[in-house]
C-alpha cells in the first residue's frame, strides 16, 4: 500500500504543477493583453468565469456565444475563436486558432500578448 501512495504522489504532483503553470501562462497573457487595451478590470483574467467575459470584451464578441461552451466538443473551438478575435488586431489570428490544440494553448496566448499593437 505504501508503494502505491508514493506512485500516486509522483503522478499527481507534476500534473498539478504543470496545470498551475499552464493556468498562470494563459491568465498572465490575458492580463497583459487587457492592460495593453487599457481595460478597467484587467484582474478579471485570473478569475475562471470572468476571464471568459473579459476575452469577449477584448475580442469584441457577443457574450451570449459563451453558451456554446456547454455544447460538447464545441468548447475548444470557441476558445480558439475567442483567441483568434483577440489576436486579429495584432495580425495573429492564426495563433488564436492554434489554441484549439491543447499543447499550443499555453504558448500561443503568450505570443499574442507579447506582440504589441
Image (cartoon, rainbow, N blue to C red):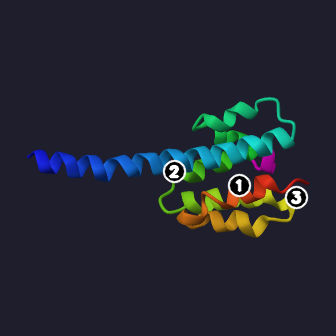
Of the residues tagged 3 and 1, which is closer to the observer? 1
* Position in image of residue 82 (x %, y %): 70, 55
Assess whether mark 1 and mark 3 are in contact (beta carbons under 8 angstroms).
Answer: no
Q: Which residues are magenta?
A: 58-62
* Position in image of residue 100 (x %, y %): 60, 65
Secondary structure state at the residue bearing disc 1: helix
Q: Residue at x 65, y 60 (%)?
A: 107
In the image, residue 60 lies in the stretch drawn in magenta: yes
Spatial separation of the CA atoms under disc 2 and disc 3: 28 Å
- Mark 2 or mark 3: name the one nearer the start of the chain: 2
Is 13 placed above or below 49 here? below
In the image, residue 104 lies in the stretch drawn in magenta: no
Which residue position holds label 2?
Answer: 70
Which residue position holds label 1?
Answer: 110
Q: In the displayed structure, does residue 16 sit left or right of residue 73?
A: left
Q: Is residue 6 visible?
A: yes
Which residue position holds label 3?
Answer: 89
Q: Residue at x 47, y 51 (%)?
A: 18
Assess whether mark 1 and mark 2 are in contact (beta carbons under 8 angstroms).
Answer: no
Of the residues tagged 2 and 1, which is closer to the observer? 1
* Position in image of residue 80 (x %, y %): 65, 61
* Position in image of residue 17 (x %, y %): 45, 46
Spatial separation of the CA atoms under disc 3 and disc 1: 15 Å
Instruction: Pick the quarter of the image with the C terminus.
Output: bottom right
Question: Tag on residue 59?
Answer: none
Secondary structure state at the residue bearing disc 2: helix
Judge by depth and name the residue closer to the eye, 73 or 12. Answer: 12
**Number of residues whose C-alpha sits closer than 10 Å to that of mark 1, classed few (under 14), some (14–19) or many (20 or more):** some
Amino acid at each position: 500500500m505504501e508503494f502505491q501512495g508514493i506512485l500516486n504522489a509522483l503522478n499527481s504532483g507534476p500534473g498539478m504543477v504543470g496545470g498551475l503553470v499552464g493556468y498562470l501562462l494563459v491568465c498572465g497573457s490575458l492580463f497583459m493583453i487587457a492592460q495593453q487595451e487599457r481595460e478597467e478590470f484587467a484582474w478579471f483574467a485570473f478569475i475562471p468565469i470572468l476571464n471568459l467575459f473579459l476575452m469577449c470584451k477584448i475580442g469584441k464578441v457577443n457574450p451570449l456565444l459563451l453558451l456554446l461552451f456547454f455544447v460538447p466538443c464545441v468548447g475548444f473551438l470557441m476558445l480558439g475563436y475567442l483567441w483568434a478575435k483577440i489576436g486579429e488586431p495584432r495580425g495573429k489570428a492564426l495563433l488564436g486558432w492554434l489554441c484549439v490544440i491543447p499543447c499550443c494553448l499555453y504558448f500561443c496566448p503568450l505570443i499574442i500578448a507579447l506582440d504589441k499593437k
